[in-house]
Each structure stands twice: as C-alpha cells, then as structure tokens.
Image (cartoon, rainbow, N blue to C red):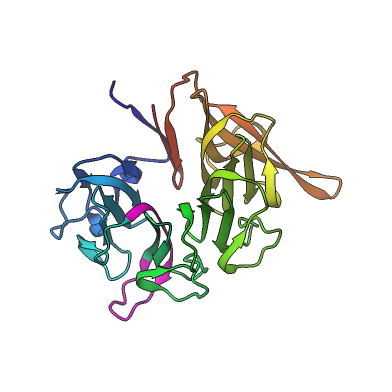
Amino acid sequence: MKNTVRFWGIIAMAAIFGLSFASCSGINDLLGRNSGGGGGGGSGADTRIPASIASASAGVSHTVVITTGGELWAWGRHGPPSRDPVRMGDAANWASVSAAGGGLITGHHTTVPITGHTLVITTNGELWAWGANSSGQLGDGTILSRETPVRIGDAANWASVSTSASHSVALTESGELWAWGANSSGQLGDGTTYTRFAPVRVGTANWASASAGGGLTVAITTSGQLWAWGAGTGSQTPVRIGDAANWASVSGSGPTTGTQFTGTSGETVIAVAITEDGMLWDLRSRSNWVQGETVTTIRPERIGDAAHWASVSAGGGHFVAVT
C-alpha cells in the first residue's frame, strides 16, 4: 500500500514546494524547487538530485541530506550560499540531521543574510553543527556563526537531535535530554529564561523523543507520557499533558494562531502528536486570567477518525502527516 501524505494549515503549496522540501526519508531521487537555491541546481529550475537518500531535513531556505553511504550534502542559504548541492567534508559516517531557519550568519565569504542552521549526528554518536548562531542554537558555547561543521562538546553518545529557529534539543543513548539556545519562553526547560550557549540537562526523566518548536519543546518519555514546556504552556519546566501513557511521536510548532488552528474560547495549537494506536491529535493551549495570575491549560484534540497515522511533522503555520 502506498503511503498517503496529508497537509493542513497555511500551506498555499508554497510551504510544501517552496524554497525547500518537507523532511523525508527513504527517497531515492530527491526533487526540490529552487527559488533561492533551496532545491539544489545552479540554474534556478527544479532539480532532481541523482543520489540515494537516507534522510533529509529542510530549513527556511536551505536543505540538508544524508545519503545511504553516509555522506552529508547541503544547498541553499546554510553557510556560503550555494544553488548546487555541496558535500560537507569528506566524512561518510553521518546518521541523522535536523535543519531550521532563523537568525543571520555573517561569514566573510558573503554579505547575504543566511537564515539557517543545521545539527547532525554521526554514526558514532558525535554531535556537529553549523550555520546561524545568534541565540547560541548551535551549542558550541559561543554566538559565532559557523560556515562549516564544528563538533559540539566531547560526548559521543548522542542519539537524536531537533532544532528550531533559535533553540535545540538532543537525546543521548541513555535517554537524557539536553537543550540549548534561546530561552525567553522557558523552552529549554531548566526553570529559567536565560539563554544557554551550551547544552544543559532537562530534568531526570528517561526520554524517548523530543521536538523543538517555536519557543516550545515537546517530548515523550520511555513510558509513553507526553510533556511540554515553553511558549503556550505557561511553564519553564516540563508539564505533563493529560493522563495517557501511549504517545508514540510528537512534533512541536509553538503557538499557532489563525482560524485553521484556533479552537473554542481562543485555544491555539502548539503541537501535533500520534498515539501508539495510530490516532492523530493536536495539542491545544488556552490561557485565562484567574485571581490575578495567568493560568494555562493544554488538552489533546483528536483530528479526524482515522487510526492509521504513521508520522507527523509541524512547520511554521502548517502540518504534514503520513499514513
């Protein structure tokens, strides 16, 4: 059976086929649209990349892919701007990648604003990053933009990474969750609003997955509990969402407004998630002024009646899910 991809929200198709493409996996020939170089190919026309792709991630105006041979390629505004795919170094041991937009990079090679950054994990558990770094989202202890990958710390036990426009989160092989970057909404989960330029640990739970959204982080524990913190949650530390313990995956968007995303009484969608039984949900946040303070509540709302959803991803004002 073929996989079915469904979109909703403010897409106008440009969000799907615009500067780049949605994150994907297992694609043999990669097709992107190339206004600004996000789709690869120096001519500015649509370009099919003749490579065997294992995984890919798209920022606002750049694209990064890992081939089945472990090579790392990028194009668009991710460092020195390039309309053609550029191999990042000679290594062939790259395993997973997360790209995002936000901030500016002002390298000496160009005066064109670069709006993206990328974090990548190698097969031996090393974490590397490059791109814009104005909020410390690369995690190298500085706010210096990087045009080529730099290693983040000395650890070699990283398992997964997720980055947003201005903050990043990563899991270790033992289930520890670490965060760094902007923290004005408490999205790092350390109980403060201080920007962190290097990874800080979030709580003591055993985490299975985590997703960085706009000013928000959402995560699932190994026991299937769903937690959130930052924008739209009213909390600078993890808050459990509901009583269910069967959550399988989650993707954070941050508070998203507009008629596509508002529920009753001014609720806004902050994330989308899938349960182990394949049901698709969005997480709706509502804040009220109660006895002199703001009280925020979050509730899951089921999307449709289908129970065969396999994966979901939140973007800036739109969502995409695969059955």
Residue drawn at (35%, 45%), measured in percent from left and top? 23
Circle count: 0
Residue 32's x, y, as percent?
23, 47
**Looking at the image, which residue is at 46% across and 19% down?**
306
The reply to whether residue 96 is visible in this rendering is yes
80 left or right, relative to 136: left
**In the image: residue 76, left or right of residue 160:** left
Q: Nearer the viewer, residue 53 or 116?
A: 53
Q: Quadrant of residue 63?
A: bottom left
Question: Range of the magenta residues?
Answer: 94-114
Residue under the image location 18 percent in, 43 percent down: 29
Characterize the magenta stretch by its predominant secondary structure: strand
Find residue 95 and report its horizontal and vertical position in percent: 35, 52
| Looking at the image, residue 4 lies above or below residue 239 | above
Q: Residue at x 31, y 55 (%)?
A: 64
**Rendered position, 117 above or below 2:** below
Farthest right residue in view: 291
Quarter of the rendering occupied by the C terminus = top left
Dividing the image into 4 quarters, which one contains the N terminus? Answer: top left
Q: Nearer the viewer, residue 211 or 42?
A: 211
Provide residue 215's location: percent of width, then percent of height. Answer: 57, 54
Q: Quadrant of residue 73?
A: bottom left
Residue 267 visible in rendering:
no
Residue 99 among magenta residues: yes
Nearer to us in this view, 120 or 231: 120
In the picture as drawn, the residue positioned furthest to the top comes out as 305
Q: Is residue 171 magenta?
A: no
Residue 10 sits above or below residue 87 on the image: above
The quadrant where residue 28 appears: top left
Q: Is residue 144 left or right of residue 26?
A: right
